[in-house]
Image: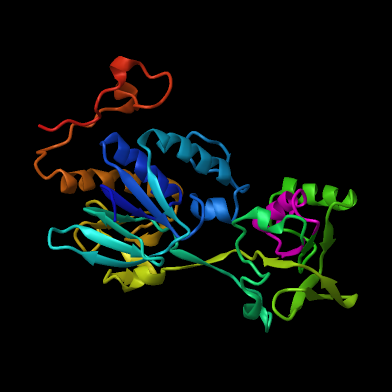
Amino acid sequence: MIKTDILIIGAGPVGLFTVFEAGLLKLKCHLIDALPIPGGQLAEIYPKKPIYDIPGFPSVLAGDLIKNLEKQISPFKPTYTLGDRAETIEKQEDGSFIVTTKSGVKHHAPVVAIAGGLGSFEPRKPPIPNLTNYEDKGVEYIIREPELYRDKKIIIAGGGDSALDWSIFLTNVAKEVTLVHRRTEFRGALDSVEKVQELVAAGKMKLLTNSEIKEIHGEDRVEAVSVKHKTDGNSKIEVDHFIPLFGLSPKLGPIGNWGLEIEKNAIVVDNATDYRTNIDGLFAIGDINTYPGKLKLILCGFHEATIMVQSAYKIINPDAKRLVLKYTTVSGVTGFDGVKKEQKKAVIKKI
């Protein structure tokens, strides 16, 4: 049983920033995410996509924003359950919650904050008739262990940042990398497209545009794929792995069965108070919630997390009459280099 003060479901940017705000109030956090790394879709789908509406950053790459958030929360030592989806939630007699993941890991906390972005992510699968027969037998939708492809022949399908970035990365790992895209133009970052073109020109990667994978061949696992080109017809390529990277499809998943008020695939919250749901002690922040005037922006999620944590503190510390919140410019943040010892004071105190 993993015990914490605030259990955060979703390790995207809003979930990560919640750790910071909770840490200022001396509250410990544990995060659950179905993806294998923190960062949500910013890390998994478009790490090199620039974001322009983060205060103080005229432009910041999505992946860099996640790295900065991880650095910001590192003094508060958050813990994680990654690559494992939250499946069930049970409210206890004392008002606390036990959340159990798909693998059976139990988590206990007095407060739960759902910061699942657009929900749990499931891979978008191409319409190949026998695709599912080869899942985990040479077909992978998410790259978790790059070493799996050491000295192997691989084909990656897709035209976004994820397909481009992994194709580039795996040229230093795999024996042969072929990138297949059904168009001639890519949706990914321009510098990634240029890097792919450089690798192709250098003979370190193969690129097939105006092409699609139509069939997979092999007895027990992937041995080859059939590729259809718009004008050149069909061809068969021997491969060890086929990796379709068409992004992830967001769904509420099991959270939709938790007794929460749902509206248009989002969790209804009270924005007049603290983004609480219809279940006491259970909050929803970020893109996963909805309320009148809701804007699905990261900076709005940061605001919601800040307000929510104040109420979480009162639930966890019911004997504290009120909070005295000090600006971090005065109190500092314990654990950061360069903060004067006399500034490392508690951000809150009980009165």
On-image quarter of the N terminus: bottom left
264 inside magenta stretch: no
Relative horizontal placement of residue 170, taking residue 235 as reference (left or right): left
- Going 60% across and 49% down the picture, which residue do you hit? 47
Residue 198: image location, x then y, percent: 84, 47
Residue 83: image location, x then y, percent: 48, 59
Residue placed most toward the observer, 63 or 276: 63
Residue placed most toward the observer, 218 or 85: 218
Number of numbered discs: 0
Relative horizontal placement of residue 78, taking residue 193 as reference (left or right): left
> For residue 120, what is the image quadrant?
bottom left
Residue 295: image location, x then y, percent: 41, 55
- Going 36% across and 39% down the picture, which residue do you hit? 20
What's the magenta region? Answer: 153-176
On-image quarter of the C terminus: top left
174 inside magenta stretch: yes
Residue 70 visible in the snapshot: yes
Relative horizontal placement of residue 103, taking residue 5 as reference (left or right): right
Residue 263 visible in the snapshot: no
> For residue 341, what is the image quadrant?
top left
- Going 41% across and 70% down the picture, which residue do you hit? 253
Q: Residue reaching furthest bottom? A: 129
